[in-house]
Amino acid sequence: MTRALLLAALLLGACAARPAQPPVRTVEAVDLSRYAGTWFEIARFPTSFQDSATRRCEAVTATYTPRPDGQIGVVNSCRNALAGGAVIEAEATAYPVEGSNNSRLRVTFFWPFYGDYWVIGLDPGYRWAVVGAPGRDYLWVLSRTPDLAPGDYAEAIGRARAQGFEVSRLQPTRQPAADAR
C-alpha cells in the first residue's frame, strides 16, 4: 500500500512539475500557389499509417494541387520497404482554416474525419517546410528536393524545437532518389 501511494505521489508530482506549453504557432501566411506541387518527406515522427508491422514508408512524397472549388487536392505516396517497395498512395482534400492566412489546413482522407496540418516553419523561397499538429503528436520536415542541406535541416528542426516538439522523435525518411546522387 505504501509503495502504491509513493508511486501515485511521484506520478502526480511529475505531472504538476511539467510546465504548460504555449500553443503551437504557425507561420504568418502561406501562398498556396507557391506551396502547390510535390514535396519530399525528409523526416517524420513515426505514425501508425506510415510505420507498422507491415509498413515502412520510404520515398515519401506529398503533392498538393489547387482545385477550382478553393480546396486543395492531396496525394501522399510512398514505397513500402516491407513489401518489396510496393507503392502506396492515399488521396485527400484539404481546406484552409478561415483567418489563418492559409497556414492551417484541415485535411480529410475520408469524410467525416479531419486532421490538422499546420505549417510551423517555411523557408522564404518555399524550399522546405515544417508541418505539425497543435497537439505536437505529428511532425514532418518536407523539402522540394529528395535531400536537404544540413544547414537548412538544422534551421527546420530549430523551428520545431522552438515550438516545443520533441525533435528527438524525428526519424529520417529514406529517399532513394537522394541516395542515387
Image (cartoon, helix red, strand yellow):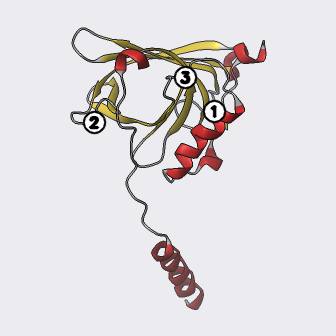
Instruction: Tell me the kind of residue under disc 1.
Output: Asp
Image height of 46 relative to 125, above or below: below
Q: Position of residue 129 (x, y in %)?
A: 51, 30
* 80, 70: nearer the viewer: 70
Spatial separation of the CA atoms under disc 2 and disc 1: 25 Å
- For the point 24% across and 16% down, the residue is 70
Circle 1/circle 3 CB separation < 8 Å: yes
Q: Quadrant of residue 50?
A: top right
Judging by the rendered image, the residue that carries numbered circle 2 is 100
Instruction: Tell me the kind of residue under disc 2.
Output: Ser
Determine which of the numbered discs, if any, sits on residue 74 in the image: none
Question: Which quadrant is the C terminus positioned in?
Answer: top right
Mark 2 nearby-residue class (10 Å; few <14, some 14–19, many ≥20): some
Q: Position of residue 132 (x, y in %)?
A: 46, 39
Side of 46 relative to 106 (left or right): right
Q: Position of residue 61 (x, y in %)?
A: 55, 18
Mark 3 nearby-residue class (10 Å; few <14, some 14–19, many ≥20): some
Image height of 144 relative to 138, above or below: above
Query: What element does badge 2 sit on?
Result: loop
Determine which of the numbered discs, if any, sits on residue 152 in the image: 1
